[in-house]
Structures are given as structure tokens and as C-alpha cells.
């Protein structure tokens, strides 16, 4: 099984020289196993993934998981070339939403005022599937579970299991210690819901081999922008410690962060990880990792 980062940057894509090393595309992560292709989020990174897959003539059947419909997680979809192939089938999974169904939001993104080709005219077969929170589904050979996270609107993380390996995708997420940012759920107090959303992070990461985590902020940046809905490395390490997860990937990098600044933060993070018993890695666009039961290794 292989994990490839096609987009690692949060909020908006950056093309400036300072983001060349770690990459400037918005979130897109591919997990490939035995000919099946699972993709998490459709930020601008999905464009190159689509081109690669078509050039290899590999995949005709995709599972796409969407954490939430903020722009940086869906804006690449209109440029996903496999969606323009009639023999391609794309299953798009997301957490159940009462209003603003994901299909409607995707369709709106491709309204003729914004984009020349409407979603409904794409030649591929696209189906939207809603996941019930906490109820696992099987797709592309993975067992997938989703739980809501503390982030403005309705956003969720994913837990993927296959061949004895567990990966958690916990992005975008605010720490849940200060503010409730998620749309409230009727019948539960705000404080109780905030606690539930915190525990959801641990449930997603419980015993995971690796956790891809939203480390957008430093603690000082978080203090100034608690309402933005993002976390810090320190929060990620605490979740991994509580969940007994082994590896953490710093992800959803701040678009203003230069490569040099990110490299310095990563060095500090590795040392902090050691004291938490967690191995820290940094997500880098274009990098592929081998995932095997018991560990992960970078591909050359
Ligand atoms: Zn985001
Ligand atoms: Zn977001």
C-alpha cells in the first residue's frame, strides 16, 4: 500500500518560490493498494494526480473522500481529468449533511458562471454517497469510518483500515479546548458537543499507524486566530499520545510559511515527538510512502 501527497498546503494554493520544496497545492492525498485508488480531498493537488493516473492508464474506478466543502478541499475537482473520461467511475463519499448536500455544492462550483463545464455534463459516472457518522463502510478494499470535527460548518475526519494498517486523516480541525466552531447539533449542549468533537479525534486516531494532522498554526498564531478552525503540532501530539498512534504527519501547511520556516518547525517537531513517543514527519508534495503493517518507509 502506498501513500502519496499531491497537495499539502492549507487555505489557498501558493506558487511563490518559498513554497517550492514542500509544495504549494491544496490538500489531496492518495492511498493506492492493489490497483484500487482512494483519494482524500480534492484540492488543487488532484489535478496532477489525475494526469498521472491517465498517463499510466491505470485507474478507472476511484473512491474520493471529501472531508468538507471548503474551497481548498474541493477546488481541484473541475480539473480532475479522469472525470472527463466516459469509462471512469467516481464514488464521492462524505459525511451526511442535513442541508447543503455535497452534490449541490459540487454542482454549484461548476455553475456556468464559474466554470465552463457543468458537473452534470462530465462524461464519467459520478455518484455521491453520504456516510453515517461512526458507521463504517467498505470501499476500494478499505474499511472507512468518518466522525465530525471541530471546524466551521460540517467537517469530518476519516479512519481507513486495510491489510492491518490504520491511517487517520484529521484535517481541518480546531483543538476543541476553547471554542465550538462546528455547526451545533440539536439536543446537545455546546460544551458537551465540544467535548464529543475532541474525543472524535482520539477515536479516529486510536492505535493508528499514522495520523495526518492539521498543523497549520504555531501556538502563538493559534492564540491570535482561534476562530479559524485549525490546530497546532502540540495538539496533534497530544491526540496521538492519547490515542497511542505511532506516526504523525504535519499537514495543511500555512500558505504563508516558507520552506525554510517549515523545515525549522519540523526539526523542533521531531524532538517534541520523541518526548511524546510519536515519530513526526512532514507532508511534502510529490512524496510517496510505503505503508506496511508495523510501519512506513519513504519511497525513493
Ligand atoms: Zn483546509
Ligand atoms: Zn476548512
Image: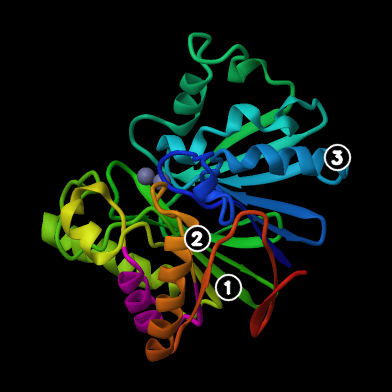
Q: Main secondary structure of the magenta part?
A: helix
Distance from label 1 to label 3 (Cα)? 29 Å
- Dot 3: what SS? helix
Q: Which residues are magenta?
A: 232-248
Is the Cβ of the residue at disc 2 closer than 8 Å to that at disc 1? no
Mark 3 or mark 1, which is nearer the start of the sequence? 3
Q: Residue at x 46, y 24 (%)?
A: 104
Q: Residue at x 60, y 26 (%)?
A: 78
Number of other residues with Cα within 10 Å of mark 2, as a class: few under 14, some 14 to 19, many 20 or more: many
Q: Quadrant of ligand 2?
A: top left
Query: Does the Cβ of the disc 3 residue fall within 8 Å of ligand 1?
Result: no
Residue denoted by label 2: 145
Residue denoted by label 1: 166
Number of other residues with Cα within 10 Å of mark 1, as a class: few under 14, some 14 to 19, many 20 or more: many
Please state which of residues 240 and 282 is positioned toward the viewer in this rendering.
Answer: 282
Of labels 1 and 3, the one closer to you: 3
Of labels 2 and 3, the one closer to you: 3
> In which quadrant is the C terminus drawn?
bottom right
Number of other residues with Cα within 10 Å of mark 3, as a class: few under 14, some 14 to 19, many 20 or more: few
Q: Is residue 168 left or right of residue 216?
A: right
**Residue 240 within the segment the image draws in magenta:** yes
Mark 1 or mark 2, which is nearer the start of the sequence? 2
Q: Is residue 120 above or below residue 223?
A: above
Distance from label 2 to label 1 (Cα)? 11 Å
- Dot 2: what SS? strand
Q: Residue at x 59, y 32 (%)?
A: 77
- Dot 1: what SS? strand
**Residue 241 within the segment the image draws in magenta:** yes
Mark 3 or mark 2, which is nearer the start of the sequence? 3
Residue denoted by label 3: 55
Distance from label 2 to label 3 (Cα)? 31 Å
Of labels 2 and 1, the one closer to you: 1
Amino acid at each position: 500500500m502506498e501513500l502519496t501527497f499531491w497537495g499539502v498546503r492549507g487555505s489557498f494554493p501558493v506558487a511563490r518560490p518559498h513554497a517550492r520544496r514542500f509544495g504549494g497545492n491544496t490538500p489531496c492525498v492518495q492511498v493506492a493498494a492493489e490497483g484500487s485508488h482512494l483519494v482524500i480531498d480534492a484540492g488543487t493537488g488532484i489535478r496532477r494526480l489525475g494526469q498521472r493516473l491517465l498517463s499510466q492508464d491505470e485507474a478507472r474506478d476511484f473512491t474520493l473522500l471529501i472531508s468538507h466543502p471548503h474551497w481548498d478541499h474541493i477546488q481541484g475537482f473541475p480539473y480532475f481529468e479522469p472525470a472527463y473520461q466516459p469509462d471512469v467511475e467516481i464514488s464521492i463519499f462524505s459525511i451526511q449533511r442535513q442541508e447543503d448536500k455535497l452534490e449541490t455544492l459540487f454542482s454549484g462550483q461548476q455553475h456556468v458562471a464559474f466554470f465552463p463545464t457543468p458537473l452534470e455534463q462530465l462524461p464519467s459516472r459520478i455518484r455521491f454517497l453520504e456516510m453515517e457518522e461512526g458507521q463504517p463502510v467498505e470501499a476500494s478494499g478499505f474499511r472507512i469510518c468518518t466522525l465530525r470535527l471541530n471546524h466551521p460548518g460540517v467537517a469530518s475526519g476519516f479512519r481507513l483500515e486495510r491489510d492491518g494498517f490504520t491511517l487517520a486523516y484529521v484535517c481541518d480541525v480546531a483543538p476543541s479546548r476553547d471554542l465550538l466552531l462546528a455547526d451545533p447539533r440539536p439536543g446537545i449542549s455546546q460544551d458537551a458537543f465540544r467535548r464529543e468533537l475532541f474525543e472524535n479525534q482520539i477515536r479516529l486516531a486510536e492505535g493508528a499507524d499514522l495520523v495526518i494532522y492539521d498543523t497549520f498554526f504555531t501556538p502563538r498564531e493559534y492564540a491570535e486566530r482561534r476562530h479559524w478552525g485549525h490546530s497546532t503540532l502540540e495538539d496533534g501530539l497530544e491526540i496521538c499520545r492519547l490515542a497511542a498512534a505511532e506516526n504523525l504527519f504535519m499537514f495543511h501547511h500555512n500558505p504563508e510559511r516558507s520552506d525554510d520556516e517549515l523545515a525549522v518547525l519540523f526539526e523542533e517537531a521531531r524532538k517534541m515527538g520523541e518526548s511524546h513517543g510519536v515519530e513526526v514527519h512532514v507532508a511534502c508534495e510529490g512524496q510517496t510512502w510505503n505503508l506496511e503493517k508495523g510501519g512506513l518507509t519513504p519511497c525513493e
